Image (tube, rainbow, N blue to C red):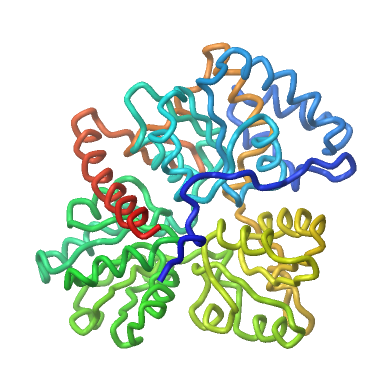
């Protein structure tokens, strides 16, 4: 069961400090990846002598400080822990907040005085904020092509036909639990079926809530978080059924192809490529050296069971940063996060390594970062704020609940007003159930 310390109810400072000699950008995007409106900012950024604070900060100040002065307390900057070091550090430097997906989702509704909210993360996170936002709040994303590969494996057109088969077979005995890493349209499906949203921090709470109702659960989209949650709650492996991998099987299967009748929990076959690289052998390698191993529950069950602890990004960060000096941690999660954590923990006398970075195994995946999250970078942040200040922000960067954006082309499908109203109502039901379940337990 999730413990209170595992759940981030609100953002708190990461403790990340900018250092004069440490680069704050892990890579540069090619110029043709930028929208036309952002290319002038990218060209200036690319022309900087290097990526250290001495050169990046003065350049950013030219654009961000006037926007901060213009919008004042009505502006809120947000970023997820998985953002590359530059955005996490810079968002906090300019007064913004860094958090996991649960705390980010609540930021608009919990801060009604913030009218312009600019998020540097992936699209589903911005859309979730928009779903819970008030009518007078605007949600913007610095790069609309910043998607999530797991969310891409569970688009509504993929999930809905299978869900309809399951609902036809099991009726009201089935409910959907939608992981936060889904579109608003999938969250609405959870709401329609009497289900809820969950995050990696509160999944055991939400699944336990569903089980106590005697319901069969369709868990979308992450099979590994589903399996780990089931194991944490004591379900036998025979009570968990995983549907086909959407990438290899497409969505050509039918419910009858899988043993769903005997399953208490039916997991969609999605996954996060960043987290499926971790193995039990890697965990044992570090533990034999007397390092503590903590891992994200999007990892495979076999690796999670070997680890000393598992939990959300907030759990991973807080566990390390609150440990005594001399502690040693191997951390199994996204690479940019681990590099930031390693850098900051060193100031406290704590050693951190990436779980996959071991001798005798292929460590090419060590430090693997979320490539789509990293599509947000300093030029996107500077350009977004400057264009907003001038009233010239591209509409494609505005996020409304129900938006579906092509991660390659940035083409957008937007629901009509009535369609959006219905979708938001159902998605809000699922999100509010999650909030109620979570905060009752904390």
> Between 396 and 133, which is closer to the camera in this rendering?
133
Q: Position of residue 321 (x, y in %)?
A: 69, 59
Q: Position of residue 74 (x, y in %)?
A: 50, 20
> Between 220 and 134, which is closer to the camera in this rendering?
134
Residue occupying the point 85% across, 45% down:
22
Q: Quadrant of the N terminus?
A: bottom left
Q: Quadrant of the C terminus?
A: bottom left
Q: Position of residue 338 (x, y in %)?
A: 69, 60
Q: Is residue 113 left or right of residue 314?
A: left
Residue occupying the point 36% across, 56% down:
438
Q: Is residue 435 left or right of residue 247?
A: left
**156 over 222 or under it: above or below:** above
> Between 227 and 169, which is closer to the camera in this rendering?
227
**78 over 168 or under it: above or below:** above
**270 over 309 or under it: above or below:** above
Q: Position of residue 415 (x, y in %)?
A: 27, 34
**307 over 297 or under it: above or below:** below
């Amino acid at each position: 069961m999730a413990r209170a310390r595992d759940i981030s109810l609100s953002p708190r400072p990461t403790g990340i400090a900018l250092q004069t000699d440490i680069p704050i950008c892990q890579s540069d995007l090619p110029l043709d990846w930028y929208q036309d409106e952002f290319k002038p900012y990218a060209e200036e950024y690319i022309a900087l002598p290097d990526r250290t604070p001495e050169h990046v900060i003065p350049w950013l100040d030219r654009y961000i400080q006037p926007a901060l002065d213009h919008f004042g307390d009505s502006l809120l900057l947000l970023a997820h822990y998985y953002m590359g070091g530059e955005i996490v550090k810079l968002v906090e430097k300019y007064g913004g907040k860094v958090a996991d997906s649960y705390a980010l989702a609540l930021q608009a509704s919990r801060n009604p005085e913030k009218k312009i909210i600019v998020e540097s993360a992936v699209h589903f996170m911005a859309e979730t904020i928009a779903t819970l936002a008030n009518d007078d709040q605007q949600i913007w994303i610095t790069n609309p092509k910043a998607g999530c590969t797991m969310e891409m494996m569970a688009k509504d057109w993929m999930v809905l036909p299978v869900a309809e088969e399951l609902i036809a077979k099991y009726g009201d005995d089935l409910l959907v639990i939608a992981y936060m890493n889904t579109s608003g349209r999938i969250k609405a499906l959870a709401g329609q079926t009497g289900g809820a949203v969950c995050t990696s921090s509160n999944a055991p709470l939400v699944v336990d809530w569903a089980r106590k109702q005697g319901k069969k659960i369709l868990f979308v989209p992450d099979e590994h978080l589903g399996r780990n949650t089931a194991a944490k709650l004591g379900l036998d492996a025979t009570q968990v059924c995983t549907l086909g991998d959407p990438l290899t099987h497409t969505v050509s299967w039918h419910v009858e192809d899988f043993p769903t009748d005997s399953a208490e929990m039916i997991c969609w076959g999605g996954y996060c490529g960043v987290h499926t690289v971790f193995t039990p052998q890697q965990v044992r390698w570090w533990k034999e050296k007397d390092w503590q191993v903590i891992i994200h529950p999007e990892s495979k069950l076999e690796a999670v069971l070997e680890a000393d602890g598992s939990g959300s990004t907030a759990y991973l960060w807080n566990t390390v940063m609150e440990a005594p000096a001399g502690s040693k941690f191997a951390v199994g999660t996204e690479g940019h996060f681990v590099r930031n954590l390693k850098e900051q923990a060193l100031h406290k006398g704590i050693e951190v390594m990436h779980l996959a970075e071991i001798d005798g195994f292929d460590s090419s995946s060590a430090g693997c970062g979320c490539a789509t999250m990293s599509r947000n970078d300093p030029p996107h942040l500077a350009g977004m704020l400057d264009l907003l200040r001038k009233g010239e922000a591209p509409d494609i960067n505005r996020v409304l609940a129900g938006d579906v954006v092509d991660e390659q082309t940035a083409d957008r499908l937007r629901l009509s007003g009535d369609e959006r109203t219905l979708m938001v109502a159902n998605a809000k039901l699922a999100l509010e159930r999650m909030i109620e379940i979570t905060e009752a337990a904390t």
